[in-house]
């Protein structure tokens, strides 16, 4: 069988004896999603199976409710519970060193490994396995494990499958390829259960989440002749709807889903902080570069940014100006810088 990732898989095989020699912590990003948690669970389990003396998982934020089924056999640490003797950090699904949060970045100033698929990744670790053409970090790990004949049990397969299915939008996004389906089939053969994953991910919404969605949909505003749709969640809305920040997962996709909209955005107020999520159907619009202009990053079609000490309306005005130029440049056939 042709290798999925011949270069990365060969490098991983060479690194594996050193990877399993010392205790390690698998670090994910703040506000973890399916690809993040799936990558952490899968890498930790495979390294343990290969004889690593201790592998733990670390996140700044708790595992989201709808992803708790993935870590029932793998407890996640916070910085307060992580044993002080673990100094080797393996970062997954983190586009930059600060993505897990500044506290974690300070604890691990030089990660040993970085596995990621973000186009904006700046290769900050000692060893970097970065493949932006992949649909998910879990897709990279799946290919590497399969290429090297590493054992994938049913729990690991389910974690990897969840990462792939969530980051491809249930196989709808442009990042989905033949390789994606081949890997998904292999994961099912190793015990992944698509029906169970689909139920846990998409059929356990709370009443509060639906109220939050109502508030978001009612806030929509159109710009740039209807090509940009921006929704807004004000400070205090989580308390009013008995929800949390994890319930914003997927909301921005509704703004992008409107016919004729090229870019959808979600602006959230959180005290003195503003979070913006950006989504586009067309990678030519380079949402990662739009976000980077505000200090953020991400993918060509999905990116985000965080700001402090600025008003939401000021952010909206600046964002509309930036997106207006992006769309005009793309229409002219110019590259988006």
Image (cartoon, helix red, strand yellow):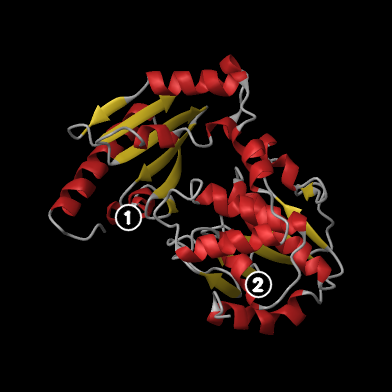
Q: Residue at x 44, y 45 (%)?
A: 304
Foreground label between 1 and 2: 2
Residue bearing the label numbered 1: 283
Disc 1 versus disc 2: distance between alpha carbons?
A: 29 Å
Image quadrant in which the C terminus is located = bottom left
Characterize the local packing of mark 2: few (<14), some (14-19) or many (20 or more) Cα atoms within 10 angstroms: some
Q: Is residue 90 visible?
A: yes
Q: Residue at x 50, y 36 (%)?
A: 250
In this image, 124 relative to 332: left or right?
right
Q: From what the image shows, is residue 267 above or below residue 84? A: above
Residue bearing the label numbered 2: 146
Residue 279 rendering spot, x and y as whole percentages? 38, 43
Where, by quadrant of the figure, is residue 246 drawn?
top right
Residue 56 rendering spot, x and y as whole percentages? 79, 57
Q: Regarding mark 1 in the picture, which secondary structure is present there?
A: helix
Q: Residue at x 53, y 32 (%)?
A: 248
Characterize the local packing of mark 1: few (<14), some (14-19) or many (20 or more) Cα atoms within 10 angstroms: some
Query: Furthest-left residue in view?
Result: 332
Q: Residue at x 41, y 32 (%)?
A: 254
Q: Regarding mark 2 in the picture, which secondary structure is present there?
A: helix
Q: From what the image shows, is residue 29 above or below residue 24? A: above
In this image, 301 relative to 77: left or right?
left
Q: Nearer the viewer, residue 201 or 82?
A: 201
Q: Which mark is residue 53?
A: none
Image quadrant in which the N terminus is located = bottom right
């Amino acid at each position: 069988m042709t290798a999925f990732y011949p270069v990365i898989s060969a490098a991983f095989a060479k690194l594996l004896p050193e990877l399993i020699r010392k205790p390690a912590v698998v670090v994910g990003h703040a506000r973890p999603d399916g690809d993040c948690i799936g990558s952490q669970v899968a890498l930790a389990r495979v390294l343990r199976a290969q004889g690593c003396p201790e592998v733990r998982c670390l996140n700044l934020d708790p595992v989201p409710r709808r992803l708790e089924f993935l870590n029932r056999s793998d407890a996640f640490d916070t910085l307060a519970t992580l044993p002080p003797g673990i100094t080797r950090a393996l970062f997954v699904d983190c586009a930059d060193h600060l993505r897990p949060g500044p506290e974690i970045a300070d604890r691990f100033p030089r990660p040993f490994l970085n596995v990621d698929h973000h186009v904006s990744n700046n290769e900050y670790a000692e060893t970097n396995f970065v493949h932006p053409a992949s649909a998910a970090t879990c897709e990279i790990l799946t290919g590497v494990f399969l290429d090297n004949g590493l054992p994938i049990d049913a729990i690991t397969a389910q974690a990897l499958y969840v990462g792939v299915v969530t980051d491809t939008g249930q196989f709808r996004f442009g990042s989905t390829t033949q390789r994606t389906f081949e890997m998904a089939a292999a994961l099912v053969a190793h015990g992944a259960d698509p029906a169970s994953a689909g139920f846990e991910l998409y059929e356990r919404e709370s009443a509060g989440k639906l109220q939050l969605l109502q508030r978001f949909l009612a806030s929509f505003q159109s710009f740039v002749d209807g090509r940009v749709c921006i929704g807004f969640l004000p400070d205090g809305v989580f308390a009013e709807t008995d929800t949390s920040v994890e319930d914003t997962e997927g909301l921005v996709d509704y703004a992008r889903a409107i016919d004729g909209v090229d870019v959808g955005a979600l602006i959230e107020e959180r005290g003195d902080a503003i979070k913006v999520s950006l989504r586009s159907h067309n990678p030519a619009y380079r949402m990662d570069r739009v976000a980077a202009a505000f200090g953020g990053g991400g993918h060509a079609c999905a990116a985000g940014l965080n700001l402090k000490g600025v008003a939401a309306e000021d952010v909206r005005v600046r964002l509309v100006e930036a997106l207006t130029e992006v769309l005009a440049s793309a229409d002219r056939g110019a590259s988006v810088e």
